[in-house]
Amino acid sequence: KLAMFNVSAIGLSLNPSAGLAYLVPRRLRQNEKPRIVLDISYRGLIELGVLSGSILWAKSELVYSNDSFVYKGPAEKPDHVFDPFGTSQERGDLRGAYCMAELTSGGYMIEPMSKADMDKIRDKSEAYKNNVGPWVDWPEQMQLKCPVKRGSKWWPKSSSKVADALKLLDRENGEGLAVLNINSNTV
């Protein structure tokens, strides 16, 4: 029931072809029964940012050691050159990720995140500590989600739905990224 209430409150489609949100069985600890939770994808968080009027679009990318990556600050697009068809072995070790969002007011917001920071978030997840959940099953998707979650806190807000989504992911789903001092006007 709580998962369905959260679907209604957040307002994202559960259509699997959209890939915005899913109802999934999840347990935070190995000895507890799975429960159905609303899992919001990084694409769902971006959709909430677009629907709220905060951003026009956003994209998250992983950065590997063999990629050419130059960060130019929080408001300028980075230079990221890589072979999108290369295997993970060809691209090297994961170094981090970033989220780039175009603001409706003009300009960009770039949120970089190191692999070490992503690992800290992963390691706080109760599900991961118990070798279950999305960090175990889909690590790359969770790594893409990390800079989107962090970056979305800085997007201008015209709706509380992004804040509600972040609270849901952190408190109900145990993803590990603590969001402090959340209110409907500032995330």
Image (tube, helix red, strand yellow):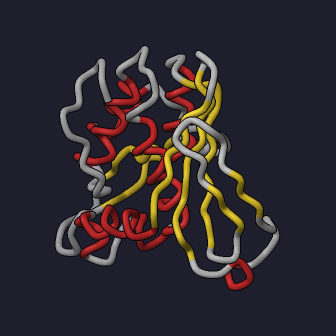
- Image position of 184 with respect to 29: above or below: above
Q: Give the position of the N terminus as an image quadrant.
A: top left
- Image position of 37 with respect to 113: above or below: above
Q: Is residue 161 left or right of residue 50?
A: left
Farthest residue in the bottom direction? Answer: 89
- Image position of 139 with respect to 91: above or below: above
Is residue 8 something one can see in this rendering?
A: no
Farthest residue in the front direction? Answer: 72
Q: Quadrant of residue 28?
A: bottom left
The residue drawn where x is 53% and y is 71% is 95
Is residue 32 something one can see in this rendering?
A: yes
- In front: 107, or 102? 107
The residue drawn where x is 45% and y is 68% is 115
Q: Give the position of the C terminus as an image quadrant.
A: top left
Q: Quadrant of residue 64?
A: bottom right
Residue 53 placed where, x, y %? 54, 17
The residue drawn where x is 27% and y is 37% is 2
Residue 106 placed where, x, y %? 63, 20
Q: How many marks?
A: 0
- Image position of 98 with respect to 149: above or below: below
- In front: 145, or 38? 145
- In front: 97, or 138? 97
The residue drawn where x is 50% and y is 52% is 112
Residue 107 placed where, x, y %? 62, 26
Q: Is residue 186 left or right of residue 18?
A: left
